């Protein structure tokens, strides 16, 4: 059969060409989103076999996804060869906080000036979702709504590169957001987010930036303070330090 005949026969086959997205890509995307959304805790060890079973796959694509996340600094390899969510020293966490302020403040100010009325209404709904989730003790829903709130603003900044940098920072930040879901932290967190919405509605992009920065700074201070004094009430608590001097979760 000629090449043209082969091509014609292929077009008549009763199935579609497989998607370019591989199983490895889907596992990677799922794990990455879980890290960014705060579904893992700092210091948590990830089992290749357990993830493979949960995903219904062999360990090979899971291993490749983990390697990819390690290269992006979302995961680390421990001395015993296990893969875990990173623990940070106070200095490393403060460095992350400072870089966040630089890039997220810029994205917030740019994005605030480009948001439509409908987009601002979306921010209001995200605030309402966070309030309801906190009242119900639904940590996962709260953190998901918090992420959507921030990225709804950043996504309007007009710079795909800036957004990719922020996304990379949140990959490292996500697990630590678990430490900020507590009554005393919630009060200032939702107040700052409501202030961001009010500033955007008033057309004051500088005030929106400043409210985002206050949210970042106070949340980081709360996380560091709790790690130092040995934790907060709750199902999972931070210890003061690991033996290496890094912020960790029991």
Image (spheres, helix red, strand yellow):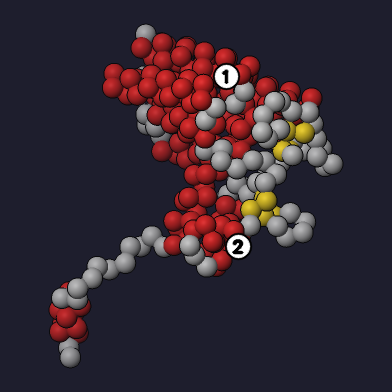
Q: Is residue 16 left or right of residue 80?
A: left
The kind of secondary structure element at disc 1 is helix
Q: Would you name the residue on which mark 1 appears?
A: 186
Asked whether the viewer can see residue 247, the reply is yes
Query: What label sits on residue 83 in the rendered view?
Result: none
- Please report the residue visible at 33 percent of the width from the left and 62 percent of the height from the top: 19
The x and y percentages for residue 206 are: 46, 13
- Kindly indicate whether the residue at mark 1 contacts the one at mark 2 (C-beta within 8 angstroms): no
Question: Residue 68 placed where, x, y %?
Answer: 56, 56
For the point 55% across and 27% down, the residue is 137
Q: Is residue 144 above or below residue 216?
A: below
Q: Quadrant of residue 213?
A: top right
User: Is residue 96 shown to the viewer in this render?
Assistant: no
Location of the N terminus (image quadrant)? bottom left
Q: Which of marks 2 and 1 is nearer the N terminus?
A: 2
From the top left corner, tell me how far across and down residue 171 is, in percent.
56, 41
Q: In this view, does 207 lie above or below 217?
A: above
Q: Which of 230 and 247 is in front in this view?
A: 230
- Image coordinates of residue 177 in percent, x first then y, are 60, 32
Element under label 2?
helix
Mark 2 = which residue?
Answer: 49
Where is residue 35, by image quadrant? top right
Q: Compared to 64, does 191 lie above or below?
A: above
In the image shown, does 43 or 165 lie closer to the viewer? Answer: 43
Q: Which image quarter: residue 241?
A: top right
- Tell me which residue sits at (52%, 38%) in the image: 37
Viewer-proximal residue, 52 or 79? Answer: 52
In the rendered image, the residue lying farthest to the front is 136
Distance, label 2 to label 1, CA atoms, is 36 Å
Tell me: 26 left or right of 43.
left
């Amino acid at each position: 059969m000629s090449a043209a005949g082969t091509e014609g026969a292929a077009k008549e086959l009763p199935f579609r060409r497989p998607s370019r997205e591989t199983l490895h890509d889907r596992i990677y995307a799922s794990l990455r989103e879980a890290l960014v959304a705060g579904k893992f805790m700092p210091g948590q060890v990830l089992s290749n076999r357990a993830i493979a079973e949960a995903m219904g796959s062999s360990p090979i694509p899971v291993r490749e996804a983990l390697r990819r996340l390690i290269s992006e600094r979302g995961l680390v390899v421990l001395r015993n060869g296990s893969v875990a969510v990173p623990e940070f020293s106070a200095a490393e966490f403060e460095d992350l906080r400072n870089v966040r302020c630089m890039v997220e403040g810029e994205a917030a100010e740019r994005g605030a000036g480009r948001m439509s009325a409908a987009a601002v209404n979306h921010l209001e709904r995200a605030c309402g979702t966070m309030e309801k989730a906190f009242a119900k003790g639904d940590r996962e829903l709260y953190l998901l709504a918090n992420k959507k709130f921030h990225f709804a603003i950043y996504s309007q900044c007009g710079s795909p590169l800036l957004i990719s940098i922020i996304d990379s920072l949140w990959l490292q930040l996500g697990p630590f957001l678990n430490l900020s879901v507590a009554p005393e932290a919630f009060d200032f967190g939702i107040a700052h987010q409501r202030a961001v919405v009010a500033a955007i509605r008033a057309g004051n992009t500088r005030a929106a930036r400043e409210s985002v920065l206050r949210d970042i700074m106070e949340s980081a201070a709360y996380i560091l303070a709790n790690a130092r004094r040995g934790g907060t009430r709750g199902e999972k608590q931070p210890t003061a330090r690991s033996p290496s001097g890094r912020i960790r979760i029991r």
